[in-house]
Image (tube, rainbow, N blue to C red):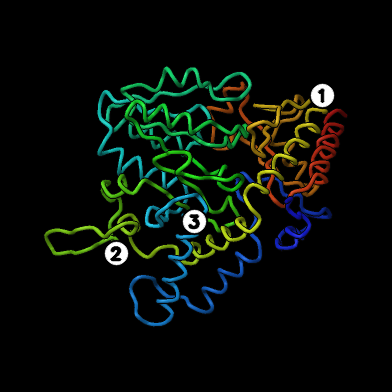
Amino acid sequence: MTIDVAKIRADFPILERRIGDAPLVYLDNAATSQKPKQVIDALTDYYTRYNANVHRGVHTMSVEATEAFEAARAKVAKFIGARQPESVIWTRNISEAINLVAYSWGDANVHAGDEIVITAMEHHSGIVPWQQLALRSGATLRIIPRTGNGRLDMDAARKIINSKTKIVTAVQMSSVLGSVNDVKTLGKLAHENGALILVDGAQSAPHMPVDVEDLDCDFFGLSAHKMLGPTGIGVLWGRPELLKAMPPWMFGGDMILEVSYEKASWNELPYKFEAGTPNIADAIATGVAVDYLSALGMENVRAHEIEITGYALKRLTELERVEVLGPTDNADRGGIISFNHADVHPHDLGTALDRMGIAIRTGHHCAMPLVRSYDVVAAARASFYIYNTTAEVDALVEGIKQVERYFQK
């Protein structure tokens, strides 16, 4: 089965927008995806029909809100292959999910002399929390390098991950290079050395099938806004035995079991890590986003991405003055292409393309060390999703050609 892109596009009201005189060509999906009307309607439905707090009331609307909120949690659990819904923790985004692990599990388990291993492809959210944990604990931060063709150096990984390693954290799909990393092998290396692995699924969960049990990871995180859901909500999945042993890192209502003026005890999973009134509406809408992707089939989403990325790589590499960062083949690669033009600064390119209605990203993509490892300070990035077409790739390429001609005058 292939997905019907024309039918899908009809579900996204924003794709009817024009930027100036040009139709919108949205190629900034790695930053955030657009939202189908089903997700937008779910938000409106909550606020107009059953806006109430969860877990606290016996009245009809509170019960309805609680049921929808917990049903969304179960949908996310099924979507990522988690056996127990209570192992899915709602967070604001994957950045908060990683920080939760770094503070709760990290502060309790990482000490001076230990090592924390990250990859050279990490988003800032996969670097800075571990830097800070290393500073707090006296541990050493080690980095698995990339190869010249934009892949992880797995030979180096086998040497870097050792008996001193406490945790490995790895992005499954690079937000700069599009490389799909072999996190399953990294997890095996971690476990063989008595360490844990956290997988950053911010870019992978929206675009390919994910099964946390098959990956054999210990923690997995995602952000809903990159997979058709609202902004401001994400997920941390963790092995239940690990989550149960971890102390809370925020305190307040709903995460409490019993309180006196002298002491407190904590609620069961998942509520132990969900202090205060949660982001109810956006959690419910995330469940609807998961329904949408599940109906398409993630294998079909991935097949569309492989097809359009292969086409985009072919067209972009036809441009003599354009250099693609990272892999130029379409094997084990996601729909993210960062590139530079020999004569045009990325910000100039992005601004000029915007006037043609083409939205791309420019900058270091919250992965400054990785981008700078290519001896550039910024890069342009086009990223694709289920509603993008080869005609939009053609528009991008023709737009770059127009910018070239302008700067050559």
The residue pinned by badge 3 equals 76
Most foreground residue, 328 or 193: 193
Residue at image position (57%, 42%) is: 203
Comes first in the chain, label 2 or label 1: 2
Q: Position of residue 254 (x, y in %)?
A: 30, 64
The residue pinned by badge 2 equals 253
Most foreground residue, 192 or 277: 192
Q: What type is the residue that disc 2 sits on?
A: Gly
Corner quadrant of residue 261: bottom left
Comes first in the chain, label 2 or label 3: 3
Q: Is residue 276 above or below residue 326?
A: below
Residue at image position (75%, 30%) is: 344
Q: Position of residue 372 (x, y in %)?
A: 57, 25
Q: What type is the residue that disc 3 sits on?
A: Val
- The residue carrying pointer 3 sits among few (fewer than 14), some (14 to 19) or many (20 or more) residues within 10 Å by Cα, namely many
User: Disc 2 to disc 3, how far (Cα)?
Assistant: 24 Å
Q: Is residue 328 above or below residue 273?
A: above
Residue at image position (66%, 38%) is: 336
Q: Quadrant of the C terminus?
A: top right
User: Disc 2 to disc 1, how far (Cα)?
Assistant: 59 Å
**Which secondary structure lies at badge 3?**
helix
Mark number, residue 35: none
Most foreground residue, 146 or 378: 146
**Furthest-left residue in this view:** 262
Mark number, residue 320: 1
**Which secondary structure lies at badge 1?**
loop
Compared across the picture, whether 104 is left or right of 187 comes to: left
**Which secondary structure lies at badge 2?**
loop
Q: What type is the residue that disc 1 sits on?
A: Glu
User: Disc 3 to disc 1, how far (Cα)?
Assistant: 44 Å
Q: Is residue 59 above or below residue 387?
A: below
Compared across the picture, whether 409 is left or right of 18 comes to: right
